[in-house]
Amino acid sequence: MSSAHSAASSASTSFPRPLAVMLLMGLATMFAGNHVAARVAFDEGTGLLLAILLRSSVALVVLACLIVVQRKRLSLPVATRPWQLLVGLLIAVQSLCLYSAVARIPVVVALLLMNTFPIQLALLTWVLGGPRPTGRAILIMAIILTGLVVVLDVPTWLSSPSAMGPDWLAGVGFGLGAAAAFSMALWITEHRLSDVGSTLRSLLAMMTVLVVMLAAGGMGLMPGGMNLPGSPSGWAGLMALGLLYAIAFSTLFICVPRLDMARNAPAMNMEPVAALVMGYLVLGQVLSATQLIGSAMVMGGILLLGLSKRP
């Protein structure tokens, strides 16, 4: 009886599904805008560490405000502390890899590579003793991987590596590395940090990212990582990067209890689509017709994977 009452109460506090889906698509578009703005900033000489420091600082302020408003306790069980630290380090790696990919290859391609994390997470879960992916899931994964081969234009690269540019292979590696780091962070969060509140988990992860980036900058581990933008457009990109991420991140965290993410999360797959449009309008990045077909295969597969999940 109480569980039925709880379900009814939860349903009554959720946004209507069309509103929730539209909101999630809007947030996904803002996250895509954040990456396009990052590419603008990088093209004008902005350091990678500086961009990540700005984004992490904004996220940290938002999370700290949420902790205060919600009056959350800042207690972390002793047994979870090493795992929490590891998640923070993985998110730092993911941020570095994703922005490094965005700086080297078209934004939409970087985000499509990043969005392979559901495949990597499913395989990681299986390897670590979880359920084996279903036949349907394996078929969908095969479609996604085939689409990636098309969108990355692998045959062209194999026949003439120089035609793809010197940064192509590194960009692809960074994109897949970002997905790998994120999938590992998700596995640890689900299996080792489930008793820690989501806001506190995120706050501590962002604090770790900030400390790691400050340390890397202070020790000069990434030459030029703290370089300031070299033009007004670079400054505009850097400011837009922080602003878009702040608005999208805070809105998502505040509204997530009412968004019924179990049903509506696939709407966030709007991000690569938005990046494709904005990459063309802002950066002049154009994919070939064949690559667009590959993008559609990847996006369709990701959407099917998302819709096949159960609460």
Image (tube, rainbow, N blue to C red):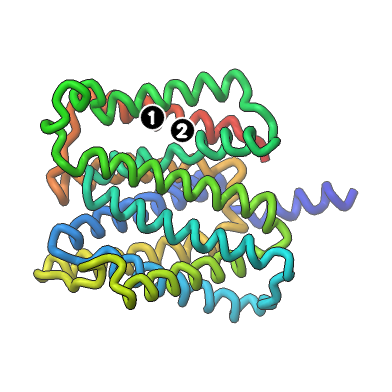
Q: Position of residue 311 (x, y in %)?
A: 67, 41
Q: Which amino acid lies under the numbered mark 1 shown in the image of this protein?
A: Val
Q: Which residue is mark 2?
A: 302
The numbered mark at residue 175 is none
Whether 67 is drawn above or below 263: the answer is below
Residue shown at 37%/25% (left/top)?
297
Q: Foreground: 192 or 222?
A: 222
Q: Position of residue 178 (x, y in %)?
A: 41, 48
Q: Are marks 2 and 1 in contact (CB under 8 Å)?
A: yes
Q: Which residue is mark 1?
A: 298
Callout 1 secondary element? helix
Left or right placement of residue 257 versus residue 39 in this view: right
The part of the image, by quadrant, that contains residue 34 is bottom left
Callout 2 secondary element? helix
How packed is label 1: few (under 14 Cα within 10 Å), some, or many (20 or more)?
Answer: many
Left or right placement of residue 237 versus residue 75 in this view: left
Residue shown at 47%/33% (left/top)?
303
Q: Position of residue 38 (x, y in %)?
A: 25, 59
Q: Which amino acid lies under the numbered mark 2 shown in the image of this protein?
A: Ile
Residue shown at 22%/39% (left/top)?
168
Could you give the CA–CA distance between mark 2 and mark 1, rounded to whole angstroms? 6 Å
Whether 154 is drawn above or below 235: the answer is above
Q: Among all residues in the image, which is located at the extreme right?
A: 1
Whether 299 is drawn above or below 117: the answer is above
Q: Position of residue 54 (x, y in %)?
A: 34, 71
Q: Foreground: 200 or 240?
A: 200
Whether 94 is drawn above or below 229: the answer is above
Residue shown at 55%/52% (left/top)?
185
Q: Foreground: 211 or 287?
A: 211
